[in-house]
Amino acid sequence: MRSTSTFLTLSALVALVSAGVQLESNNIGFPNKGTQGCIAASSKSAGAPLVIHDCNTGDASNYDWDIVEFPLDPTPQQIKLFGQDLCVDVTNGANNDGTKLQLWTCTPGNTNQLWSHTSSLGIWQWAGTNKCIDLTDGNVNDGNQLQVWTCDSSNMNQQFPGRTVGDTQSVTVTLEGGPDISPKPRLCLAAAENYDGARITLAPCDDVKSAFGNGNVTWVVPRANLAGLISTFDGTKCLDLFNGDTTNGNRFQLWTCDASNPNQIWKVESLIPKGRATIDRDGNKCVDIKDGNFVPGADLQIWDCDASGNNLNQRWIAVQ
């Protein structure tokens, strides 16, 4: 296996997201179940519950936050959903253990939205109170609404250290398909030509021209946990689901890039626990090598995802 390989999943979503900070829980229940729990918006609307969510799945724009994390500073700040005018808010400003947290329109000086970050463990204290953001009942299930609780720096339910999403939104790769067994001919996701409607197929990673004289196997893809276009190296044409039809067996094509077209928006994320790669739409339908035909010119299709990651027809490796 090459050291430059990165195992990824790519999910089709409807929004392009930018870089931010993800606030990930230190509760050991998450790694024990093979997930990573992040503070997340249940939706992008005022009044939406603030919840815990596996930050390897779903729309990353719901758990990217605009904050000042370092250097540590007790100056109160808002915890703002990146690119949105929505902030973490104490519902009705009730200073009681168990008060639930929500998203609300950001208002400068709103004391229900001010938080102090003074611990490298990622403890967020409601400014002017002894209450901190808390994982309710230590429940690590997706959708558990977060609360405030009396601060305790040793309580891992209150520890949410940040990790910064890469400040570049994309990376140039080849997408190698099929079993990762050497020696074998390396076959990559390819555009057979560079015009609207061109086939998406397999071609030799190291010699695409031998199969398709005007073919392309180099793609610009979103970084992990970001959503966006999967474009050819020149940035003009993109991976596109034909007619947006997710029926099993539908094909893919190359088409002029359009960031507002949901048929072209994909998300890149790690697949825990096996770290294998799929290219999928909304987490349910995947880019699939038809009939496991691992040869140049093979047809690709949309197909129900195999969540186990064991289906070789849906396994892709991003190689920089």
Image (tube, rainbow, N blue to C red):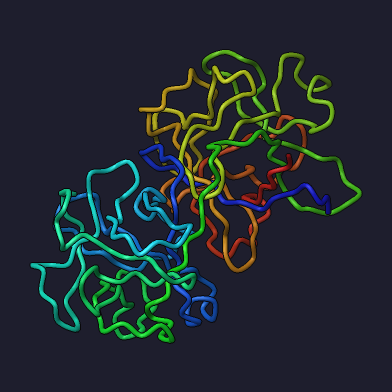
Q: Give the image location of residue 73, x and y in percent.
A: 40, 61
Give me the residue at 65% from left, 46% from top. Answer: 291
Residue 254 falls in image quadrant: top right
Give me the residue at 17% from left, 48% from top. Answer: 108
Residue 32 falls in image quadrant: bottom right
Give me the residue at 44% from left, 36% from top. Answer: 265
Seen from the viewer's position, the closer of residues 294 and 191 is 191
- The correct choice, above or below, for 202 with respect to 269 in the image is above
Give me the residue at 51% from left, 42% from top. Answer: 302
> Which quadrant is the C terminus positioned in?
top right
Residue 44 is left or right of residue 36, and the answer is left
Residue 146 is left or right of residue 28, and the answer is left
Residue 65 is left or right of residue 50, and the answer is right
Residue 301 falls in image quadrant: top right
Residue 255 is left or right of residue 61, and the answer is right
Q: Give the image location of residue 3, x and y in percent.
A: 81, 51
Q: Give the image location of residue 306, x and y in percent.
A: 54, 59
Residue lying furthest left in this view?
A: 92
Seen from the viewer's position, the closer of residues 30 and 275 is 30
Q: Give the image location of residue 22, x and y in percent.
A: 44, 57
Seen from the viewer's position, the closer of residues 254 and 64 is 64
> Which quadrant is the N terminus positioned in?
bottom right
The total of numbered circles placed on residues is: 0
Seen from the viewer's position, the closer of residues 236 and 115 is 115
